[in-house]
Amino acid sequence: LSARLAELRDLPAETADGVRIRLNANIEFPHETSAAIERGADGIGLYRTEFLYLSSEQEPSEEDHYQAYSQVVREMCGRPVVIRTLDLGADKMGHRPLVEQEHNPFLGLRSIRLSLRNLDLFRPQLRAVLRAAVHGDVRVMFPLITTIAELRQARMLLNLVAEDLKDEGIPYRGDIPVGMMVEVPAAVVMLENFVREVDFLSIGTNDLAQYTLAVDRSNEYVADLYQSSDPAVLRLIARCVEVADNAHTSLAVCGEMSSMPARALLLLGMGVRNLSVPPSSLPRVKKAIRSVSINQCQEIAARVMKLEAARDVDMYLLDRLGDLV
Ligand code: PEP
Ligand code: MG
């Protein structure tokens, strides 16, 4: 680590006018925790647990999950760790074919839908999360929540495994914060209802943009239509900020948008105060945060919200924040 990076690590993610931003790390493997700490992450904002599934030869056991989570939680020494439950399906398939070939896998049996239909997969993971919570500040987050029923089912299952652990005399913590990812437009539309039933929200701009714009971002024919800076996506994010603020529910942005410095500053201007980015992006994003005032960000956001196309948004950001884009 260079001296400049090390210096930046010890400085807070704070704007020039002193507004503290929570800057967390997204990780996929426990070994990335050290990189997150070295680059000064305030916590783990998104632990993509499906990678344990995708990287191992055999299906991971409850013990495998528990060991992986405990390692991350212990290493973070009391800082928050948001464990996202399995986000398998669509582009992320394990060894066991969990679904037959689907015509539209991104609209299919993926993520929380798949977990809720495969309890032999989901239950061991939830048990491991509650067991690992004994070692630090663990929060659990459900991906791709689309309906209230899904959220309630997932929460109910979490309560059931807590009761099992209690009956079995296994150490666990049952009262951990429960959150959901906001990455389906339906969840944004219904957000007033969701905030009554969760402790925190995290916007996944990758999927939110994909589902809002009806664009498969891995499809080269339409990839240019995929932009998290699209005004339609920005309006959905603005709505999330408003609903979360009114309900005093904490809101983070953990999609790739938050690791693009100019877009991260746009998010601050829109009222977001919690970002989660890959460890490699932490220094860049922190540097950007420290270089602006909240007023500047708000002024930029106000102008951006009047624009009608992603291209105009990007050009404006380039013009205002050129060296950061
Ligand atoms: C997202 O959709 O923005 C997100 C963070 O989840 P993933 O990229 O793992 O789908
Ligand atoms: Mg997603």
Image: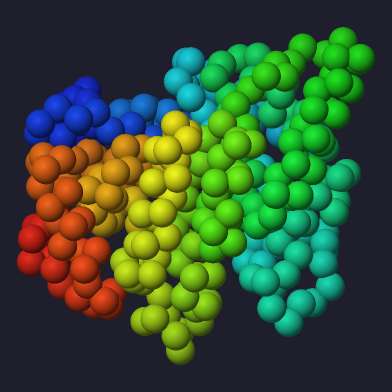
Q: Is residue 94 above or below residue 288?
A: below
The answer to whether residue 54 shows anywhere in this view is no
The answer to which quarter of the image holds residue 131 is: top right
* Residue 109 falls left or right of residue 73: right
Taking the spot 32% from the left edge, 69% from the top edge, the residue there is: 231
Q: How is the image coloured?
A: rainbow
**In screen coordinates, is 79 left or right of 315?**
right
Q: Position of residue 86 (x, y in %)?
A: 68, 47
Q: Relative to 182, is 126 on the left or the right?
A: right
Q: Residue at x 26, y 76 (%)?
A: 308
> Who's the residue at 32% across and 43% down the image?
272
Q: Position of residue 165 (x, y in %)?
A: 85, 19
- Check the image and report above or below for 245 versus 204: above
246 left or right of 308 in image:
right
- Considering depth in this image, is 61 or 196 the residue closer to the camera? 196
Q: Quadrant of the N terminus?
A: top left
Q: Which quarter of the rendering shows the C terminus?
A: bottom left
